[in-house]
């Protein structure tokens, strides 16, 4: 698997910078979709900027399944989750490029978050197929990309790939923000 464009591990600390919430307020972004007891997926979770708030919302009966390609991100995430007393609600999965990456994940997710990750993934077609496969019927996928790294055209191309996997647009992109919400209807 090509790792050349992957965000360096130390950037994980910068993604946790508290002022980030002025632009990306995690609770505000996920709370329309994430509810207590849900199983949610944080794909490309890094050190858990969104994971910990989602773990708090799903509560003791819910779980957050966290995927990343870097073990160090998952390690730091678990340390943070332990301190926040939500570790038992998390499951971490290291992406290795093997068929075991998504084992047991069919039709389990009530919500998927894909935030600032897809542009680092060489095979987006496979990515969206895998995510769509994890989603339950009626569930949502929140997909966002950083406009500094991704052009509008590239974002639209990603949207088409997602639509090819059977996802439909529930909330279209607004203005210059590269964010869209998909729903799995079938
Ligand atoms: C820019 S960070 C975004 C982290 C987090 N979603 C956020 O918004 O704070 C991208 C993350 O995606 C991970 N990543 C890159 N390629 C990946 C892949 N193929 N599968 C899973 N995670 C990947 C990186 O290791 C990194 O932690």
Image (tube, helix red, strand yellow):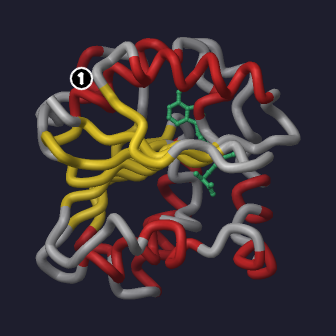
Residue name at image x 60 percent, y 38 percent: 117
Residue name at image x 56 percent, y 40 percent: 70
Compared with 50, 74 (above or below) is above
Compared with 111, 143 (above or below) is above
| View quadrant of ligand 1 | top right
Classify 10 Å Cα crowding around label 1: few (below 14), some (14-19), many (20 and above): few
Name the quarter where the N terminus is drawn. top right
Name the quarter where the C terminus is drawn. top left
Percent x, y of residue 169: 42, 36
Which sits in the foreground, 36 or 90? 36
Question: Which residue matches tag 1?
Answer: 100
**Horizontally, is 11 left or right of 135 in the view?**
right
Residue name at image x 14 percent, y 73 percent: 37
Which sits in the foreground, 186 or 24? 186
Mark 1 C-beta to ligand 1 under 8 Å: no
Percent x, y of residue 118: 59, 31
Residue name at image x 74 percent, y 64 percent: 13
**Horizontally, is 29 left or right of 156 in the view?**
left
Q: How many marks?
A: 1
Percent x, y of residue 178: 69, 43
Label 1 sits on a secondary structure element that is helix
Residue 8's image quarter?
top right
**Horizontally, is 29 left or right of 78 in the view?**
right
């Amino acid at each position: 698997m090509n790792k050349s464009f992957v965000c360096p591990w130390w950037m994980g600390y910068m993604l946790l910078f508290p002022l980030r919430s002025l632009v990306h307020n995690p609770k505000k972004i996920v709370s329309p979709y994430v509810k207590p007891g849900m199983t949610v997926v944080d794909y490309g979770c890094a050190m858990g900027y969104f994971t910990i708030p989602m773990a708090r919302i799903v509560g003791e009966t819910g779980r957050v399944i966290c995927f990343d390609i870097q073990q160090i991100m998952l390690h730091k995430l678990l340390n943070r989750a332990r301190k926040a007393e939500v570790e038992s609600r998390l499951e971490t999965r290291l992406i290795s490029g093997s068929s075991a990456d998504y084992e047991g994940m069919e039709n389990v997710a009530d919500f998927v978050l894909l935030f600032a990750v897809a542009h680092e993934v060489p095979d987006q077609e496979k990515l969206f197929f895998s995510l769509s496969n994890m989603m339950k019927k009626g569930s949502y996928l929140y997909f966002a990309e950083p406009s500094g790294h991704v052009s509008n055209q590239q974002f639209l191309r990603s949207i088409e790939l997602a639509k090819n996997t059977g996802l439909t647009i529930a909330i279209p992109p607004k203005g210059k923000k590269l964010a869209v919400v998909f729903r799995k209807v079938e």
